[in-house]
Image: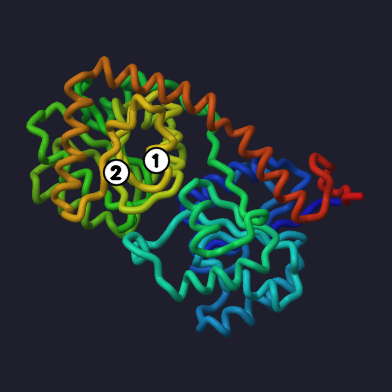
């Protein structure tokens, strides 16, 4: 007997929650069966699923208004009959409502961050909807302290139902950065260049063009950018490259299913977002022994060791000021490669001590088993006594 988990995402494109979920699916093993529904029909993150995993990708439902979507999702829940429903972020809130109408009580909701329209402030309608809808689930899982506080104070959820599970990383999957001369040669990056990397979906809330504008402020032409990712902001990034005549110093390689070797080619990692919570890409960069520069969003400052927090800059009221601050700390790192190397080694040690994948896996397994009414550590087919 196995447990059947239905995952509902607004989109199943590669991003933090999707990457984490595929890694959990791989680690949970054959005692768990999974179905995945992407509300928008995009399932490009399927490339990250482990071979042989018991996973079914469900066809997207036809687009409809909120009430009709809830009805269709209720019908899907009754047809699929999952043991546990896992919903992800605001885009899947209709599935939470549908579960209530379908009589499914085993529901865990995940909140990982916000859309661009809530980067600067929260929409009252969504706040009230979360207060109402999420009170009926068995638990809400968040990866950051920032979200934990929001869930308690803004959404007013019962403390015992909010579970803070920091993201974790498999350290052995990421070798320490060594410049990767072969990859640099393939991409046309000079061996002696100081390479700052960006890894993530090119979405507006991640503001990837800000990094290009910051790079343009550096007088040092030996500083290059290596950008991994695809998405709707790709045109804005390309326009910024043209505006600043940076084609020789910015290397766009698109989405990479396995980014580990690209981290090896970097000297530093940059996060230029307007909103984040606990970015998986930052953990991957830290595991690769890279120092980081970042805007002060979500739990980024909390994730880094104290020695790296001087490279986290505030989001200023004026965009130009934020860009200038990002350029300043980036220039500071590039001017002192030995310090950059030392900070990177401290980041890797910090990940190993505080953000081990095994710790995250154990916490998620415990939440799943509790929602299913099973004893902690029990075989998936064993009910709780």
Q: Nearer the viewer, residue 17 or 152?
A: 152
Characterize the local packing of mark 2: few (<14), some (14-19) or many (20 or more) Cα atoms within 10 angstroms. Answer: many
Residue lying at 49% horizontally and 63% vertically, measured from the top left: 154
Q: Nearer the viewer, residue 63 or 215?
A: 215
Whether the residues at callouts 1 and 2 have beta carbons within 8 Å, the answer is yes
| Nearest to N terminus: mark 1 or mark 2 | 2
Task: Please give left or right for residue 101 compared with residue 333 in the image.
Answer: right
Task: Please give left or right for residue 356 compared with residue 2 in the image.
Answer: left
Residue 221 on image: x %, y % = 10, 30
Q: Is residue 82 above or below residue 290?
A: below
**Does residue 337 appear anywhere in the picture?**
yes
- The total of numbered circles placed on residues is 2
Q: Is residue 50 above or below residue 318?
A: above
Residue 303 on image: x %, y % = 44, 36
Residue lying at 59% horizontally and 44% vertically, measured from the top left: 165
**Does residue 47 appear anywhere in the picture?**
no
Of all residues, the one furthest to the right in this rendering is 385
Residue tagged by mark 1? 300
Judged from the image, the secondary structure of the residue bearing numbered disc 2 is: strand
């Amino acid at each position: 007997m196995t447990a059947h988990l239905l995952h509902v995402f607004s989109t199943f494109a590669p991003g933090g929650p999707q990457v984490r979920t595929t890694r959990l699916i791989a680690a949970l093993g054959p005692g768990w069966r999974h179905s995945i529904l992407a509300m928008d029909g995009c399932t490009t993150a399927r490339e990250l699923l482990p071979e042989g995993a018991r996973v079914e990708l469900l066809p997207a439902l036809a687009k409809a208004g909120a009430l009709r979507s809830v009805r269709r999702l209720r019908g899907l829940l009754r047809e699929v009959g999952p043991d546990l429903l896992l919903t992800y972020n605001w885009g899947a809130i209709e599935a939470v409502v549908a579960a209530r109408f379908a009589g499914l009580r085993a529901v865990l909701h995940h909140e990982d961050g916000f859309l661009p329209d809530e980067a600067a402030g929260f929409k009252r309608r969504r706040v009230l909807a979360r207060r109402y809808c999420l009170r009926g689930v068995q638990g809400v899982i968040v990866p950051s302290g920032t979200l934990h506080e929001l869930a308690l104070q803004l959404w007013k959820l019962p403390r015992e139902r909010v579970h803070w599970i920091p993201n974790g990383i498999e350290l052995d999957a990421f070798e320490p950065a060594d410049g990767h001369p072969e990859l640099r040669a393939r991409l046309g990056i000079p061996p002696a260049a100081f390479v700052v990397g960006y890894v993530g979906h090119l979405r507006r809330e991640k503001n990837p063009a800000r990094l290009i504008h910051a790079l343009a402020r550096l007088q040092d032409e030996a500083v290059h950018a290596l950008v991994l990712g695809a998405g709707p902001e790709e045109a804005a990034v390309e326009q910024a490259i043209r505006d600043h005549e940076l084609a020789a110093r910015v290397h766009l390689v698109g989405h990479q299913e396995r980014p580990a070797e690209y981290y090896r080619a970097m000297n530093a990692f940059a996060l230029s977002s307007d909103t984040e919570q606990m970015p998986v890409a930052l953990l991957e960069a830290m595991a690769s022994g890279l120092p980081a520069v970042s805007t002060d969003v979500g739990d980024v400052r909390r994730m880094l060791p104290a020695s790296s927090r001087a490279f986290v800059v505030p989001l200023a009221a004026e965009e130009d000021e934020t860009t200038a601050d990002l350029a300043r700390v980036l220039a500071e790192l590039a001017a002192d490669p030995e310090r950059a190397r030392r900070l990177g080694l401290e980041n890797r040690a910090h990940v190993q001590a505080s953000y081990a994948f095994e710790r995250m896996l154990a916490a998620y397994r415990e939440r799943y088993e509790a929602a299913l009414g099973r004893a902690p550590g029990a075989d998936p087919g064993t009910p709780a006594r």
